[in-house]
Image (cartoon, rainbow, N blue to C red):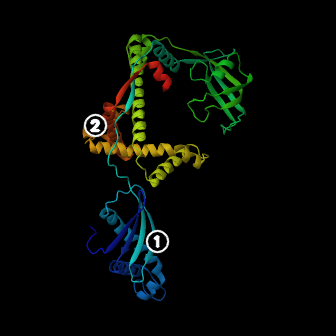
Amino acid sequence: MYPERLSVKVEIKKVEELVHELSVEVEPDLISEKLEARFAEVRKDVRLDGFRKGKAPMGRIKSQFGDEVKADVADQVIKTTFPDVLRDKELKVASTPAITELSYTDEGGFNYKARVEVYPEIDSIDTDGLIVTAVELEVTDEEVDNAVNDLRRSLAEHRKVERPAKNRDLVTADMKKISDPGMVLKEDGFPESTIDLSSPLTIKEFKEQIPGMTAGDEKEIEVNYDKDYPDKKFAGAQIKYLVKVITVQEQLLPEFDDALAKSTGFAETALELRMKIRDDINNQKKREIQQHQKGEIIRQMCEKNHIPIPPGLINEYLKAMVDDVKKRDPDANEADIRNNYHGVAVNTLRWSLLFNHIALKENIEVLPSDTEKVIKSFAEHYQMTEEQAKEMLHKTGKTESIRDNLLEEKVIDLLIDKAKIVSIEPNKENKDS
């Protein structure tokens, strides 16, 4: 109900599936009271020529400040009445309403219209027939060896040498772009780039063609980036560089022994550290499998439940994405960003509605003890007290997102329990992912 003495009439019309148009009429008695009060405030504060402050005739005040006062009162009346209108009509607003057609009536009242997007009504959700894949965890000796070598490289000493580069060296080079048909690179050059010829992540053309070069040597190297290259900007691109070697450094890798293990602070012996590395890889694979299963559940749920999403909500999501991308790349095309992320926006918003509805239906809640575990882990990771962690998370607005993430995890666990589990071989899983 509207507050006492608030005389408001409302007509509501559904104009689209999730859009309502509200026509609001505010009766003259309230408007008259608001106008007179505002004019009195203006009269008290202004000084007109020939009159002392607060003594100007009301007629002059209304004549000179009428439009300004009416605009102020209109804004005040909308702020006062609109929230009550929404509550009275039980509208669950999804995006920022558009207020239009503001007008004072000849009788002294005030009218306005509001275009309101609402969340969809969800009667039921289909959770039948969900399928998730499960792979038997396997950590190979080769994976452990690679991780051990990564650790050794991170602790390596580097010594400048006057000889041709070898496969395990660290090379510093000036790189200039010669050709870039796809216009991938904005930069023309990359001075003093570091190229680790021992790293499995280094581009293969560099690993194949830089060995044998010495300081001062130049060579044109054409790179054909894989279609699944991690940086999507380069995926499938063909770029030719002029590479000039500045320095060659050999990497002196430490022995993987008990002394190295102790220096890390994680183990006392090389064997113990190797076992810890294996456990870390195993835990990382577990997280990857869980993340993959989560993606499978979300995709299937969004495919099964095509609930409509308010366009304004999608637009707000895309606007945030545009702002985020442009912070990193000011020259990015807004239309391209919106087009590329539209499907992501729809499914992200659809899934949010779905998992919150499931949580409500299944009485799934996030308990204080759940959030306390996250806060404790956060505090331990960043070496602070739990009170400091709470304060930081609250200040950065992360407290609510923690609750949402925990609620989502509980719903995901419920849906995985309902799903059919299909086991696949580790190698096949790696190919598919």
| Circle count | 2
In percent of the image, x 42 and y 33: which residue is there? 296
> Residue 319, relative to residue 90: is it above or below?
above
Residue 326 visible, this orientation:
no
Q: Position of residue 75 (x, y in %)?
A: 41, 70
Q: Position of residue 363 (x, y in %)?
A: 25, 42
Q: Position of residue 222 (x, y in %)?
A: 70, 26
Q: Position of residue 208 (x, y in %)?
A: 66, 18
Q: Disc 2 residue type?
A: Asp
Residue 45 visible, this orientation:
yes
In percent of the image, x 48 and y 22: which residue is there? 430
* Foreground pick, 297 / 34: 297
Q: Residues within 10 Å of mark 2 (few under 14, many from 20)?
A: some
> Residue 329, relative to residue 164: is it above or below?
below
Q: Which mark is residue 370?
A: 2
* Foreground pick, 242 / 365: 365
Write down the quadrant of residue 365 in the picture. top left
Q: Which mark is residue 101?
A: 1
